[in-house]
Image (cartoon, rainbow, N blue to C red):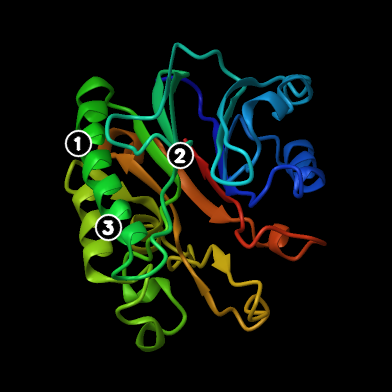
């Protein structure tokens, strides 16, 4: 296997609004792979040349004002893909083979609320994603699916399970959809690390805090950003972390970046 490398995944909630923070993260953390979600910039306005000056090979898919994903890699792309069958045609998924790994960048639909069409579309999206992930795992032993899943997998992943019971992103159909991804042969890496690494205090930390309720300081958060690894990828990885400091900076995203070492 190739030498270890670092991967950071971050829902930036507008690349243009968060551009100074993205530059800071690149300069200070120096990720080998950077996966961005909710870039909210159409392809014609994506800063490909500027990001290329940082030494990245770049794959991106955008839409005006919403959605959007970007995949930045210090390694050349051996394969690249935008979207998957049944994804609804929005800019929510990128996939590339780099450094001998197949890596996918996901920005799943929010779903809004139970009973509205967006919720049903979210579950349909996950049904088709599961089918596609099964194909990915058949192609590459070393596989990573990272990004904003917009699902809190368990009650441990939200600050107040009783308050959020039966609500997006904590409904049982959503959690069943998440478990169906794991059933394809993936492991939720944060939960694995928290239970297996001696002395590592990593108990599925939160990654998102609501702007409107000033929820960061009291840590009223949710873990909706994840990294799922195939068994071979997990065996090769080292413990990661949530980069909480980026949620404390001026004009932050409502998400903190997650970093993993592969």
Q: Which residue is mark 3?
A: 120
Viewport quadrant of the N terminus: top left
Which of marks 2 and 3 precedes in the sequence? 2
Front-most of 145 and 81?
Answer: 81
Q: Which residue is mark 1?
A: 131
Which of marks 3 and 1 precedes in the sequence? 3
Please determine whether, in this image, residue 6 is positioned above or below residue 181: above
Q: Pointer 2: residues within 10 angstroms few (<14), some, or many (20+)?
A: many
Q: Which residue is mark 2?
A: 92
Q: Residue at x 75, y 48 (%)?
A: 18
Q: Quadrant of residue 40?
A: top right
Mark 1 and mark 3: span between their CA atoms? 17 Å
Residue 215 percent coordinates (x, y): 62, 79
Q: Residue at x 30, y 52 (%)?
A: 121
Instruction: Say if mark 1 contacts mark 3, CB within 8 Å.
Output: no
Mark 1 and mark 2: span between their CA atoms? 16 Å
Nearest-to-viewer mark from 3 and 2: 3
The secondary structure type at the circle numbered 3 is helix
51 displayed left or right of 207: right
The secondary structure type at the circle numbered 2 is loop
Instruction: Say if mark 3 contacts mark 2, CB within 8 Å.
Output: no
Mark 3 and mark 2: span between their CA atoms? 17 Å
Front-most of 234 and 130?
Answer: 130
Nearest-to-viewer mark from 1 and 3: 3
């Amino acid at each position: 296997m190739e030498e270890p490398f670092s991967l950071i995944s971050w829902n930036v909630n507008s690349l243009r609004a968060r551009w100074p923070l993205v530059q800071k993260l690149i300069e200070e953390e120096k990720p080998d792979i950077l996966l961005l979600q909710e870039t909210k910039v159409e392809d014609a306005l994506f800063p490909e040349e500027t990001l290329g000056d940082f030494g990245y090979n770049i794959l991106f898919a955008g839409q005006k004002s919403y959605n959007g994903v970007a995949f930045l890699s210090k390694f050349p792309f051996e394969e690249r893909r935008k979207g998957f069958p049944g994804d609804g045609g929005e800019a929510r998924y990128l996939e590339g083979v780099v450094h001998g790994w197949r890596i996918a960048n996901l920005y799943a639909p929010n779903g809004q609320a139970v009973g509205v069409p967006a919720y049903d579309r979210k579950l349909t999206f996950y049904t088709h994603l599961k089918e596609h992930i099964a194909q990915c795992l058949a192609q590459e032993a070393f596989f990573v699916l990272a990004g904003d899943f917009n699902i809190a997998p368990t009650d441990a992943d939200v600050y107040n399970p009783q308050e959020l019971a039966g609500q997006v992103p904590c409904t049982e159909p959503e959690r069943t959809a998440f478990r169906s991804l794991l059933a394809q042969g993936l492991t939720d890496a944060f939960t694995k690390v928290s239970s297996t690494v001696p002395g590592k205090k990593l108990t599925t930390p939160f990654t998102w805090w609501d702007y409107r309720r000033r929820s960061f300081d009291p840590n009223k958060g949710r873990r909706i950003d994840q990294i799922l690894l195939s068994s071979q990828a997990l065996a090769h990885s080292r413990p990661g972390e949530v980069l909480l400091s980026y949620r404390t900076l001026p004009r932050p995203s409502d998400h903190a970046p997650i970093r993993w070492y592969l």
